[in-house]
Amino acid sequence: MARKLALVGIGKIARDQHLPAIATNPDWDLVAVVSRNAQVEGVQNFASMEKLLMAGLDIDTISLAIPPQPRFDYAASALEAGLNVMLEKPPGQTLAECHALEALARAKGVTLFATWHSRFADCVPEAKAWLASRTIKQLSITWKEDVRRWHPGQDWIFEPGGLGVFDPGINALSILTEILPYAVHLNAADLEFPSNRDTPIAANLSFTGPNAGKFSAEFDWLQEGPQTWDIDVETDDGVLKLSNGGATLHINDNLVKQGADQEYANLYARMAELVTTSAIDMDLSPMVHVSDAFTLGRRKVVEAFEF
Ligand code: NAP
């Protein structure tokens, strides 16, 4: 029988991805939404999380599609009420918030899922399998997109806790931490902050790891024209290129797979698996790199940014 779900925050990602993915998954029955501004037809609409929780609906899962800044309070109240919780990325503003949510979920015996949608891109499993038996000499991430196109008017992204260019960059780091056969750690970062904003608009990162491999990432939010979401890996036995955010795979310059966009369908399928055993999936490794970049990063002030 389908599980009853409530979706919180009816904004860009809820409309682009969550609502269509839920509608096509027979494991889920969307019975309610929480929105301060929007209405969704065919379900119960609540103006706040408190009103949803007070209504005593027969739901067992909450999916949060809101920005990271308010997420902790929403997630904590749902967990306190004994509900399973699915978190959009990043799972919180800070690592400590995420640890606190995980402890609460354990205490309540419910599922908590820190989703990393890019990990569920079509070619990520193949890339991981191919790299597992090879020695990596060099890996470079190039994540360059146009913030005005993908986040029009979203001022929260430039406010403390909004992560700035790490909002898309953490998607690359979620793939990195999934496909590497071992852990690497950040050893240098340069961060560019617009003079009128509190989060960076560009970042260059380098990491250190085993086998003298060189690992780097370049994030830029001012790229107009073609958008770039690539990971290039040189190994002792050939080269791999993941592009389109993990949807396309080339090995030794030959196209291996041109995948479909299944990320959110896969996320809701994974959540359906987790709730059957009240399991917790809270891998915070992508966020550790972001947190380290803010700790270790050299700050450069650049031109002011307006949408
Ligand atoms: P958004 O459209 O700016 O905001 C989503 C919704 O969250 C808003 O419509 C609003 O819903 C609610 N909200 C905003 N500020 C809030 C606050 N202070 N307190 C409570 N609710 C608030 O953002 P988005 O692009 O959907 O991103 C939401 C999350 O999804 C972020 O963590 C982002 O990283 C992630 N994400 C975004 C994309 C993308 O392409 N944009 C892709 C993947 C993941 P109501 O008006 O309904 O209350």
Image: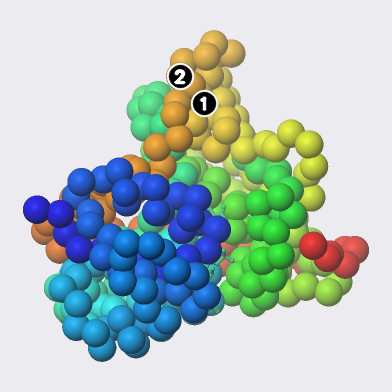
- Tell me, yes or no, whether the two marked residues, 2 and 1, touch with CB atoms within 8 Å: yes
**Residue 181 in which image quadrant:** top left
> In whole angstroms, how far apart are the C-alphas of marks 2 and 1?
6 Å
Q: In this figure, which residue is indicated by the disc labeled 2?
A: 257
**Taking 131 as reference, is 307 left or right?**
right
Q: Is 3 on the left-hand or right-hand side of 136?
A: left
The residue that appears at 70% across and 59% down in the rendered structure is 152
Tell me where residue 121 appears, x and y as whole percent. 43, 37
Precedes in sequence: disc 2 or disc 1: 1
Looking at the rendered structure, the kind of residue marked 2 is Lys
The residue nearer to you, when weighing 123 against 1, is 1
Give the quadrant of residue 104. Answer: bottom left
Query: In the image, is 276 to the left or to the right of 78?
Result: left
Most distant residue in the right direction: 303
Does residue 95 appear in the picture of this structure?
no
Q: Which residue is located at x 36 percent, y 74 percent? A: 45
Residue 291 versus residue 147 in the image, above or below: below
